[in-house]
Each structure stands twice: as C-alpha cells, then as structure tokens.
C-alpha cells in the first residue's frame, strides 16, 4: 500500500507555523473528511459493509422516532435487525405525502440547518424535499475525494459551463474566474484556476475566443452544448486549448460523442447523480460506462421484478437509500432509472457497480408491442439540416413523436422533409412524426432542458 503526497502540489506555506501543530484546524478538518471518504470508498469491503449497516440503522431509528409516516412503513420491526429488502419501495407520491404532512425531520431549532429543495422537474412534476447542511458538506468533500481516488492532476484548470436562461449579454455568456477550484484546500494545494461560464445561446465565435485565454483542463459541460458547438464533429479545438478530461453533466453523453473524445485522447468521466441524493456512482477510469457506487453516500439495489430488456441487457429499477437523508429520508427510493448491478468491477474494484444506466423517461422509448429501446442522437444531426437555438423531442403517445425546433420562425419544405427522414431513420415507420418550428420552446419550470422525454414510460 502506498499513501503519500509526493505527487500532490503543496504550497510553500501549506503547513501551520504555530507551535506544536501541523495543518491549521479548519484545513485539517476538511482534509480529514476527504481522507475518510477515500478510505470508505476504497478500503476493505467488510469494514465498509459494517459501516453502511450502522448508518442505515441510525437513519431508520431517526425516521421511526420522528415520523408517523416512517413508523407505519417500518411497522413493528426492530430497526437493528431489519433487512433493507423487507421495507416497501418509496415512490415519488410517497415522498410528496411525507413532505407535505410532516415537513423536515430535523427541527428548525436544531444545530443543523435545513433548507427546502426540489428536483428540476425535467421528467414530471418537481419532487420537493428537505436537505441539511451535512448534505452540502458531503457533496463538496466527495467531489474533492474523487480527484484523490483517481489520482487526478490538481494543477489543471477547471472550466464549468452552466446553463442560465437569464443571461442577456451580447455574446450570450458571462465568465466568472477564481484562483482555484479546491475550495478551502486552495491554501494547502497548488490548484488550477476555476472558470465558470454561465450561458444562454452563446455566440460560438466569442465563446471560442474566451476559451483560448486559459487552458481548459477539466471540461464540465452538458453534452448537448458540446454537440451544438462542434456540430461538424471536429473537436480538435478542445485538444489545442488544453482539454484534459470531459466531465459530462446534466445528461448522458451519447456514444458517438464519447467516441470523438476517446479518438482525440481525451478521457470521459461521468458521474451518476440525482437532485434528491447527490452522487450515486462515479464512472470507472479503466472500464468506461461502468460506475462505482458511492458507498459513502448511498446503498443501491436493482429491483428486477419489473425489468426491461434494452440492447439485449436485462435492466431493473434503480432503488437508492441515501444514508445521510435525515431531513427527508430516502429509503429504497425509486429514482426513476433502469440499470444493471454487479458486485465488482472489471478493474478490480471490490464494490457494487452500475452499468447500462437508462433514464426511464429521459432515454427510453416505448413501442406499441410493450417493448422499450434506447433513444438518443447527436444535435449535430439536426444542425446539419437547420441552424436552430435548441430542440425538444417528446414521445406523447405510443405512436406519436413531437419534435420542436426552437429559434426559427418556419422551416422550408426541404428542411421539413429532411427532418422527417432523419427521425424515420432513427425510429422506424411505427411513429407519426410531427415537426413544429417555434420561436421559443416552452420549457416550463424545468431546470434541465432535456432534448428527449417520454411521456408514456
């Protein structure tokens, strides 16, 4: 076993100059928390399983003591002996009922503050729940821990794109720059700069000019944005301007886009997350599209009783138990996705691994015979036909697909025919394809603007 910091860039005055001390207390607490999470995620499985079990029991005891809703679900079972699989599955309507009737299970007068939160509403009505300060702290620490788990270069810059419909500048984006992205650890480690680019329909030329000012480093962006910026499929600009890793966010990166980055020598490293529980799993650096479950945060099950077959793989419903959900408990929560669960990874990681992850409403299309299949395509296919601001594809019935092309007043007969031909090629002849040009797509309150959404899954 090797445990040292010889490859980590420490600042000259990283250590405390006070008598009989090593690292200043605030920094020491954060660094200790990072090391704790790395130990849980990568350490002995038996110790990890024991820790998870105790965290699960603590959560159940808390829920049972503060909630009649949870006492009914647990029934008369002893929380120290209860098995996870014996509890009922928590669906969104259950969550809403507990939220509306009981509110936060952490009292406002307590030492830990709670805030109201909600999902994006991208695949239905937003789910509301409460989160505590601990949840935000965990998400920050776990994000940092991933860089230590993989041995990523802390000196690289981090360039993060964030959609923001309220941006009204001439170029369609606003840049915020900070000296580092390591948070409080910036005073301990020599980290790269942090650049946040909030955008709404960014001007491609001006944006590219901005990206040449600093090496990109870690590129954190929605795949749909990357596809629209590089609709010709040539991502050499990213290589030339120092992109060392692509971290897709907000949606899944299509295989064709992944292949472009791999061909260019830029690794793709996605995270599987949800608004309700934060990080669920992180993509393996050696086995692409296999995700190591974040066992310091969640217990994951896959329920195969209502399985589907996609691409020859049998997938079950993903159920998540959030070990730190004391404000609004998530125990066996149906997250709304399908996936395959394995007990270990091909890289040698001894822990649960998720693969073949598909959003029930966001990535799967249902056919009239009851079967389902994955649906996805690059926005470049549309941009080859019509230069548009955005698009949305919805399955509104078993035989109906609605396509909206945003930012254009009308489509020519040739464009309409080409778009219908494109979707016929993608979907076959079983669907009626309705295509509409709209000046602005009505996204409603959805924070995530999904390019595809099934209303029948």
Image (tube, grey):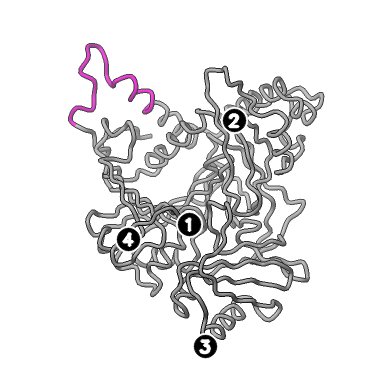
Q: Are marks 3 and 4 in contact (CB under 8 Å)?
A: no
Q: Which mark is residue 414?
A: 3
Per the model, the C-alpha gap separating discs 2 and 1 is 26 Å
| Dot 3: element | helix
| Dot 2: element | helix
| Dot 4: element | loop
Q: Residue at x 33, y 52 (%)?
A: 174
Q: Residue at x 30, y 52 (%)?
A: 217
Q: Which residues are magenta?
A: 12-31
Which numbered disc flags the more N-terminal residue, 3 or 4? 4
Q: Which mark is residue 288?
A: 1
In this view, the residue in front, 65 or 449, is 449
Task: Where is residue 46? Give x, y as percent.
Answer: 57, 31
Q: Are marks 2 and 3 in contact (CB under 8 Å)?
A: no
In this view, the residue in front, 125 or 46, is 125
Which numbered disc flags the more N-terminal residue, 1 or 3? 1
Q: Residues within 10 Å of mark 2 (few under 14, many from 20)?
A: some
Task: Where is residue 172? Give x, y as percent.
Answer: 36, 59
Q: Quarter of the image containing the N terminus?
A: top left
The residue singled out by tag 4 in the image is 170
Magenta segment's dominant SS is loop
The residue singled out by tag 2 in the image is 52
Q: Are marks 4 and 2 in contact (CB under 8 Å)?
A: no
Which residue is most to the bottom? 414
């Amino acid at each position: 076993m090797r445990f040292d910091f010889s490859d980590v860039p420490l600042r000259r005055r990283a250590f405390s100059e006070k008598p009989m001390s090593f690292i200043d207390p605030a920094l020491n607490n954060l660094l200790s928390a990072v090391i704790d999470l790395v130990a849980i995620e990568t350490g002995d499985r038996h110790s990890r399983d024991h820790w998870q079990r105790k965290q699960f029991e603590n959560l159940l005891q808390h829920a049972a003591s503060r909630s009649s809703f949870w006492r009914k679900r647990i029934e008369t079972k002893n929380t120290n002996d209860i098995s996870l699989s014996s509890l009922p599955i928590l669906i969104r309507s259950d969550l809403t009922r507990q939220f509306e009737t009981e509110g936060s299970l952490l009292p406002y007068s307590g030492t830990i503050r709670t805030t109201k939160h909600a999902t994006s509403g991208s695949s239905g009505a937003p789910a509301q729940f409460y989160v505590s300060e601990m949840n935000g702290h965990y998400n920050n620490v776990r994000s940092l821990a991933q860089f230590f788990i993989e041995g990523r270069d802390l000196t690289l810059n981090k360039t993060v794109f964030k959609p923001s419909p309220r941006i009204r500048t001439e170029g369609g984006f606003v840049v915020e720059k900070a000296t580092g992205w390591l948070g409080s650890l910036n005073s301990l480690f020599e980290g790269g700069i942090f650049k946040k680019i909030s955008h709404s329909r960014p001007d491609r030329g001006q944006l590219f000019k901005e990206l040449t000012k600093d090496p990109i480093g870690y590129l954190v962006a929605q795949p749909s944005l990357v596809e629209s910026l590089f609709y010709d499929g040539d991502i050499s600009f990213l290589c030339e301007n120092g992109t060392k890793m692509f971290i897709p966010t907000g949606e899944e990166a299509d295989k064709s886009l992944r292949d472009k980055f791999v061909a260019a020598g830029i690794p793709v490293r996605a995270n599987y997350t949800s608004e309700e529980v934060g990080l669920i799993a992180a993509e393996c650096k050696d086995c692409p599209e296999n995700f190591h479950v974040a066992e310091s945060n969640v217990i994951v099950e896959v329920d195969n009783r209502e399985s589907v077959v996609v691409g020859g793989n049998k997938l079950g419903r993903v159920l998540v138990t959030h070990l730190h959900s004391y404000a609004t408990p998530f125990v066996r929560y149906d997250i709304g996705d399908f996936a395959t669960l394995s007990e270990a990874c091909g890289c040698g990681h001894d822990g649960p691994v998720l693969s073949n992850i598909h959003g029930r409403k966001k990535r799967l299309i249902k056919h009239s015979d009851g079967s389902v299949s994955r649906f996805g395509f690059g926005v470049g296919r549309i941009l080859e036909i019509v230069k548009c601001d955005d698009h949305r594809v919805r399955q509104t019935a078993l035989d109906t697909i609605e396509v909206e092309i945003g930012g254009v007043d009308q489509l020519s007969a040739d464009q309409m025919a080409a778009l219908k031909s494109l979707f016929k090629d993608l979907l076959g002849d079983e669907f009626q394809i309705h295509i509409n040009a709209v000046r602005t797509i009505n996204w409603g309150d959805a924070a995530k603007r999904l390019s595809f959404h099934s209303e029948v899954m």
